[in-house]
Image: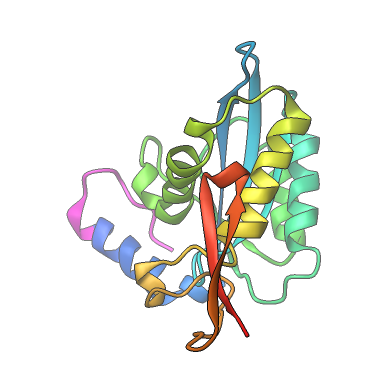
Amino acid sequence: MTKVKDGDNSKQHQWLTFLKNHAKYIVGIDFVVVRTVFFKAIYVFVAISHDRRKILHFAVTANPHSQWAIQQLRETFAFDETTKYVIRDNDKIFSDDFKLHIENFGLEDTPTAPRSPWQNPIAERVLGTLRRECLDHMIILNEKHLHSVLDEYINDYYNVSRTHMSLEKDSPVPRPAQANGKIVSKPILGGLHHIYSRVA
């Protein structure tokens, strides 16, 4: 695959075409830093499918290192038979051993060019979504609390209920349209978000 230099419009077009044509086979991975109420940094690993915008895996730690990141690869791709490309940035945590493990899963390691976050757009966008729709509204106490908050947001709301324009207003995990029954509301994260459904 052609490596893209930031600012090269021709190669940028090639990269975006690649992302579009291979979306079904691409997973983007990235990290976001969250500060606790005591200003301690906690790191969140996120792996997201380009095809359905589904968050496949997340994990949190206050002490990120290469072996921890490799374990997240195992938990993301151990039973994955669809993914072919892993898009990531050039963070130092992605060591040579980490890159080797990507290849050991039969995947193609696809790093972005330096200072080019637009080359991993789905992962970058979901990190922004996590901040705007969840983390900016929560006071995080510690790792356990952050994991609990993200677990509820991702698994009870984002993956199964939050709609996406690119999915024709469906959620990452497809859900059938409901036409009959009383509308009920289920609060998520104490009412920060709600899931609406119909019951007979």
Residue situated furthest top in the rendering: 38
Quick check: can you spot residue 166? Answer: yes
The one nearer the camera, 3 or 158, is 158
Residue 41, how many percent across, how many down? Answer: 63, 19
Residue 157, how many percent across, how many down? Answer: 58, 58
Residue 156 magenta-highlighted: no
The one nearer the camera, 151 or 78, is 151
Determine the image quadrant of residue 142. Answer: top right
Q: Where are the magenta residues, as a range?
A: 1-10
Quarter of the image that includes the C terminus:
bottom right
Residue situated furthest bottom in the rendering: 180
State whether residue 124 is above or below residue 144.
below
Residue 188, how many percent across, how many down? Answer: 60, 51
Q: Residue at x 32, y 70 (%)?
A: 17
Residue 7 magenta-highlighted: yes
Q: Residue at x 32, y 63 (%)?
A: 16
Quarter of the image that includes the N terminus:
bottom left
**Main secondary structure of the magenta stretch:** loop
Residue 20, how many percent across, how many down? Answer: 37, 71
State whether residue 87 is above or below residue 37.
below
Determine the image quadrant of residue 143. Answer: top right
Numbered label tally: 0
The type of colouring in the image is rainbow
Residue 199 located left or right of residue 3: right
The one nearer the camera, 16 or 53, is 53
Q: Residue at x 51, y 85 (%)?
A: 178
Determine the image quadrant of residue 28. Answer: bottom right
Residue 89 located left or right of residue 104: left
State whether residue 141 is above or below residue 98.
above
